[in-house]
Amino acid sequence: MSGPMEMIALRRGHRLAVRRAGHGGVPLLLVHGFPCTSLIWSHNIGPLAAAGFDVAAPDLRGYGGSDFAPDGFYDLAAFSTDLAELLDALGWSRAVVVAHDLGAAITMDFANRFAERVDRVVLLDGTTPDLADAYAAAGIPASPPVSPVFDYQVNQGLHADELLDQLNTPQRRRRYVGEFFGHRLWSPAGAFSDADRDLLTAAYADADRLRVAFADYEVVMGQRAVSAPAIEDQPVRQPTMMLVGADAVTLGSHIEQRCAIAYPDLVGPFWVSGAGHFLSWEKPTLVNRAVRFFCADLLG
């Protein structure tokens, strides 16, 4: 269901674990976020391949089955460069990109840093570029204070080692990650079964894998060096569609107005009832159909 795993070497020497299906179709890259791995696309890879896509769902550097970063960088530019090298390794000149959470932020950077490689973009409960001046000029107020449900951001970004010291057994690490699929209210109650959480948290039993997952939050908090400045102060100009779970708590206010500025060639955002942050898992049939319809001309 989740597609066979391939280890694909990049030019800089490290390898990404990539789930593959549908060789020969329209190139489609699925980019996961936190606290996920490519397994979050388990209900999408097969159906999208059957629809005519050549699907690649990588584990980001350091995540899941991929190698740890040889240079120690876990920032947007490093992730984006990995994606460009992955396209080269697959023989793809360009691809449709479907992305979620951290993957959406990476895709914003990727779509501007390597604009010629991105055909179109689908964001699932994504984010918007940092266009504060443009938002203010349009009369869009700043987002309200972050909800207490986001206390983890401070802990992971400023106190990562201390947090990991507390999560000092595989069971504690998996339970911590499992909370994001449970009581943190990112999704409707019951969206994930115990078996789902067991599958999705397995990689994080490893302390080094969980530590890497905190690195992006350290970058945001200015606690970790970056390979290059992120390109997050420009609109994404490729055709874009956004789906947002109506029960998600992860987006700020005035998302429609922000998206209209951030994504000039936008379809949506469309609000999906009965879903939260993890749309690819919670509403896979809807997501698969939306991607297929958005790319119908490419599929022929």
Image (cartoon, rainbow, N blue to C red):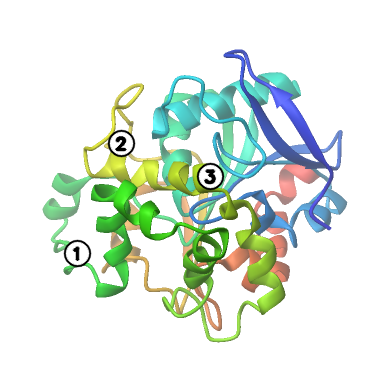
Q: Secondary structure at mark 2?
A: loop
Residue shown at the point (69%, 49%) measured from the top left? 295
Indicate which label's residue lies in the foreground, 1 or 3. 3
Is 194 situated above or below 244? below
For label 3, count other residues whose C-alpha is less than 10 Å away and answer few (under 14), some (14-19) or many (20+): some
Depth check, front residue: 121 or 7: 7
**Residue 44: image location, x then y, percent:** 74, 58
Q: Earlier in the sequence, mark 2 or mark 1?
A: 1
Is 273 situated above or below 7? below
Which residue has dot 1 on it?
143
Q: Earlier in the sequence, mark 2 or mark 3?
A: 3
Depth check, front residue: 140 or 129: 129
Q: Secondary structure at mark 1?
A: loop
Which residue has dot 2 on it?
234
For label 1, count other residues whose C-alpha is less than 10 Å away and answer few (under 14), some (14-19) or many (20+): few
Which quarter of the figure is the N terminus placed in?
bottom right
Indicate which label's residue lies in the foreground, 2 or 3. 3
Numbered tag placed on residue 71 in the rendering: none
Residue shown at the point (56%, 53%) measured from the top left? 204
- Amino acid on which disc 3 is placed: Arg
Is 64 situated above or below 248? above
Q: Earlier in the sequence, mark 1 or mark 3?
A: 1
Is 199 situated above or below 5? below
Check contact, mark 1 vs mark 3: CB within 8 A: no
Left or right: 122, with 226 as reference point: right
**Residue 30: image location, x then y, percent:** 64, 46
Distance between the Cα atoms at labels 2 and 1?
Answer: 19 Å
**Residue 260: image location, x then y, percent:** 34, 55
Which quarter of the figure is the C terminus placed in?
top right
Q: Secondary structure at mark 3?
A: helix
- Tell which residue pokes out farthest to the bottom in this image: 189
Which residue has dot 3 on it?
209
